[in-house]
Amino acid sequence: MQSIKNHLSLVLALLSILFSMQVFIIAERSIEAYKENLANNYSVVIVSKKTLAKEDILKINPLIAESFELSPDHVIKRLDSGIDAKNTELLKVTLPRFYKLSLKHYPSPSEIQKLTKELRNHAAIKKVEDFSHSHDTTYKLLLLFKGMVTVFSVCIFVVTTLLVFKELRIWQFKHSERMSIMGLFGAPMWLRSAVLFRLAIMDAIIASALSYVIFKGIESNEWIISQFQSIGIEIVIFDSIGDFFKLASVAIVLSIVLASLIVVWHKEEV
Amino acid sequence: MDKVIVAKNLSLSYSGHETIINQASFDITSGSFVFITGASGSGKSTLLKSLYGALKAQQGNLIVGGVELNGVSRSKLNFLRRHLGIVFQDYKLVKEWTIEKNIMLPLIINGYEKSVTQNQVDSLLKHVRLKHQAGKFPLELSGGEQQRVAMARALAHNPILILADEPTGNLDDYSSGLIWNLLEGANTQLKTTVIVVTHHIPESLNVEYKHFHIEYGSIYAVN
């Protein structure tokens, strides 16, 4: 019973680290997916005195992915009260050209500023509408969310790493008698500490397996899926191979590093 | 004859406290049987501790098994200890391990093969009359039985030198007899050097031995 309790505290601490790590990964993926979504819906509108070739527009800034000329028909239709066909055609020719530019990714405020400046510097472009106000707000909100998730994950990581460290020290203390007896018979450090490493690796594997089960459950949870669908994004919540490999590696490496630190910092008995 | 222990002007004390052994010089020949006697607190156990490197010399030189213990590195000390068989007054058995595994300890550390280890442990368990207790844990045994386990562990890897700290103190005649027989056997048959710290030298011993006595920090050769 005592042994299970000992393992449980280390497994839980490691599990919290893995949990915060995977939540961070999910948040990152959600933000990226949402940014992509925004980028698809976001566009800059330019007004030009003359017709611009698509290649010329694309050359202005590498951020521009595509340009579409907006048809002036709907504007003319609104004015179409008593204008004859000849004048309509004339109006069509004299009206400035409107282009909608879609971007490769969702731009940062500095990127949008640079893009607007470069578009304005173009001799043919009279006006640029970048919708920067609403864009800035959305972008800052995303950054705030990302920052909060990062801070939260780092805090959990630091606190639980200290907990794991403490737990391993308790183990070392528990096994110190055995380790000192082994030392009296000439056992090298690695052999004396083998039990510490064995326990740490075993618990890291248990914590990784538990995190696999938890995130597999989350991944198939209807409510969570519907939440993502409601904001119009689709992401991989838990990649059974890639994410599990990442989590297991972090758990095992962290346990080995902390166990090694304890062994190295431990003052050897003679 | 080779000297297994050479001490020159050896002084011992516990970190800054009063000197326990003062400027002692002696040597012990390989294959000999040695008793170290003295009153309680005279420094017998302290001297023994210094022989397996658990206490550093305050002054002088101490060479054990060809290893100079003054300023010895940890790896060299481990190397020396792997060739020593130590019997502690308080047995120092690993409580979480069975008797069998406790005896196996020096064999595991010395990297013996599993089959050799098992044969050796079985044979030793027979010698110390504990074959039937092999799967038990130290705390399930009496003091005498625990000391027999400690003795078996000290002999397991055929050490060059056995250091025994009052191995028969508080033991009944049966256990004491077994332990003296084992020490005698190791010395006569395997030519292992045996150093025993004790209050009383057994009369029934059938080996030639050397006797050192410690008094007031000095070591005297009695015979």
Image (cartoon, helix red, strand yellow):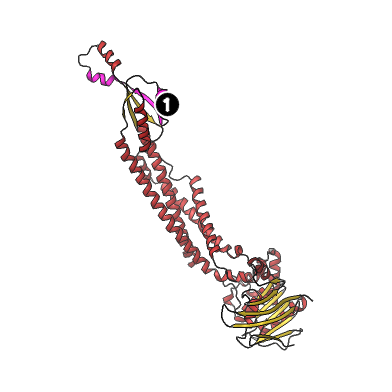
Residues shaded magenta: A54-80
Q: Amino acid at mark 1?
A: Lys
- Element carrying mark 1: helix
Q: Is residue A225 above or below residue A48?
A: below
Q: Give the percent coordinates (x, y) of residue A29.
A: 42, 43
Quarter that holds the N terminus of chain B: bottom right
Residue at image location 22% in from the left, 19% down from the top: A79
Along the line of sight, which residue is nearer the eye, B89 or A4? B89
Q: Residue furthest right?
A: B1
Q: Report whether residue A220 is seen.
A: no
Q: Residue A255: image x %, image y %?
A: 51, 57
Between B136 and B214, which is closer to the camera in this rendering? B214
Which residue is label 1 attached to? A59
Quarter the C terminus of chain B occupies: bottom right
Q: Is residue A11 left or right of residue A231?
A: right
Q: Is B192 in the magenta?
A: no
Left or right? Give the position of A258 relative to B51.
left
Q: The disc numbered 1 marks a residue on which chain?
A: A
Instruction: From the viewer's perspective, tell me whether residue B212 is left or right of residue A30.
Output: right
